[in-house]
Image (cartoon, helix red, strand yellow):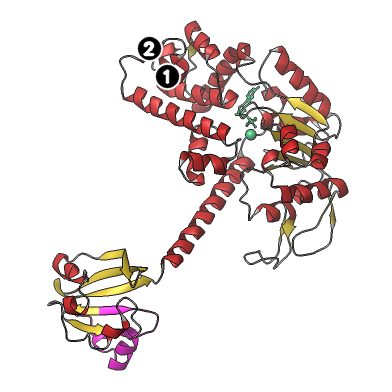
Amino acid sequence: MHEAIKKISQELLLALLNNPYESLILIDAEGIVRFVSEFNTTISKRVILDAVGRHISEVNPGSELLRTIQTGRAEIGRPLVLDDQERIIARIPLTNDGRIVGAVGKLLLSSPQKVKALYQRIENLETQLEYYKSEFEQLWGARYNFDHIVGRTQVLRDAIASARKASLNDSPVILYGESGTGKEMFAHAIHEASRRRGKNFIRINCAAIPTDLIEAELFGYEPGAFTGARRQGGAGKIELAHNGTLFLDEIAEMPLRMQVKLLRVLQDKVVERIGGGKPRQINFRIISATNQDLEGMIRKGTFRLDLFYRLNVVTISLPALRIIADDIPLLFETMLVELANKQRVPLKKVEEEALEALKAYAWPGNVRELRNVAEQVMFAADGEQVEVGDLPPKVRSGIAPMALAGSNNRLLKQSVESAERQAIEQALRQAGQNKAKASKLLGIHRTGLYQKMRRYGML
Ligand SMILES: Nc1ncnc2c1ncn2[C@@H]1O[C@H](COP(=O)(O)OP(=O)(O)O)[C@@H](O)[C@H]1O
Ligand SMILES: [Mg+2]
């Protein structure tokens, strides 16, 4: 044994063993109780007093500490129920020169409430982390202008024309369209073509901000406004959009309480940070986006009519990809060129039959889903051409179910993924695109849903 340990005074050792923050029970190699700390709450009060010197199985018939002596294996973080209360404990073997000389039972957490509270905190942190991750991607992610928007169909050309017109003035714009139809891309393009280009384009994803962050995110806060507030305070997103564009993505997800506050900001163009401070005059252009029927929400009382009037000045509807199916070949080939350049691999030509299959598929995830398929195909296609067989089963199945025969591992993986995607899409539809609700329907945690959606390019 280490020399220094031998020199610890008896008094100090006792104080360590008996400190009121720990519950310990110590047995020797024979299972005889040698010590129980005074404050021990893992065995009943009445047995603590005369436990020492008796066999553990007598003192506490259900004790599993003997197993620790037998196996020599530590068990950390196990539940223990005593007097109808669950606790989290550890059983640790004690050794000297590799020989087991005893074992100690130790209380780690005194109540499941504490465990739950801890779990809750982790869960909150996870949601916040997810949020900041997407914020980060947003900041470093692609910026678009009108040159990036691909498509020759009339409906799309009309949408582009309206957006170009809108970029010449400062009116609020609202972009309607299913997920993945290019709403964010259009918002960027309008900003880049407007006189506000070069100034900030600030996006608020109303669906992704954790509710306990939303107010601070929007309005900012003064020093000491709440616990955890940084000492110097912080600007909110609205303030950051000064002289630039504020993009309110998934506006329908904004809680009613925040709708009221936002309306006030839109009326007065003034923000006050949380915790007081001087009102700041902010000049910004507002663009919002949604895939929801806001008028229906207004009738149900979940969206404010007065806010709607403020946002719904210039309306631009983006077509679902299945509506502009004629643009699919052009879009798909443009994406392949982009991907080939980015990954420095030779460009592949797309076989006519494959293009037909792409045009026939329904594309519930729209252009985003198409991009996702383009990426998959880049990896899947072995030859110089992209053939029908290289497309994911969901795309092929509509046109040639026979191609599914002779399945292999890649096919299995793709089928699982496509089933998962479909389940997510359906749950989102059922939940009115509310991700918290959808994750409940799917029986997974919200964070998990976000991960999957990101993986499948649905965010
Ligand atoms: N007309 C288009 N031309 C080129 N890329 C597009 C077009 N529409 C959408 N995309 C691409 O599809 C993806 C999803 O677009 P996004 O603007 O995020 O959609 P939304 O905000 O409507 O969900 C992005 O990668 C975007 O670049
Ligand atoms: Mg979007």
Query: Local crowd at mark 2 within 10 Å, few (<14), some, or many (≥20)?
Result: few
The residue to which callout 2 is attached is 403
Question: Going 49% across and 27% down the picture, which residue do you hit?
Answer: 343
Residue 22 lies within the magenta run: yes
Quadrant of the image occupied by residue 369: top right
Extreme top residue here?
352
Residue 209 picture location, percent across and down: 63, 48
Instruction: Name the residue type under label 2.
Output: Ala
In the image, residue 56 sits, relative to residue 389, either above or below, namely below
Residue 146 picture location, percent across and down: 72, 25
The residue to which callout 1 is attached is 393
Quadrant of the image occupied by residue 194: top right
User: Which region of the structure is painted magenta?
Assistant: 1-25
Residue 344 picture location, percent across and down: 49, 25
Query: Local crowd at mark 1 within 10 Å, few (<14), some, or many (≥20)?
Result: many
Using the numbered discs, state the Cα–Cα distance from disc 1 to disc 2 in whole angstroms: 8 Å
* Residue 249 visible somewhere in the drawing: no
Quadrant where the C terminus sits is top right
Residue 136 lies within the magenta run: no
Q: 407 or 255: nearer the eye? A: 255
Residue labelled 2 has its Cβ within 8 Å of some atom of ligand 1: no
In the image, residue 351 sits, relative to residue 414, either above or below, namely above
Q: Is 290 left, or right, of 8 in this rendering?
A: right
Question: Going 63% across and 52% down the picture, which residue do you hit?
Answer: 211
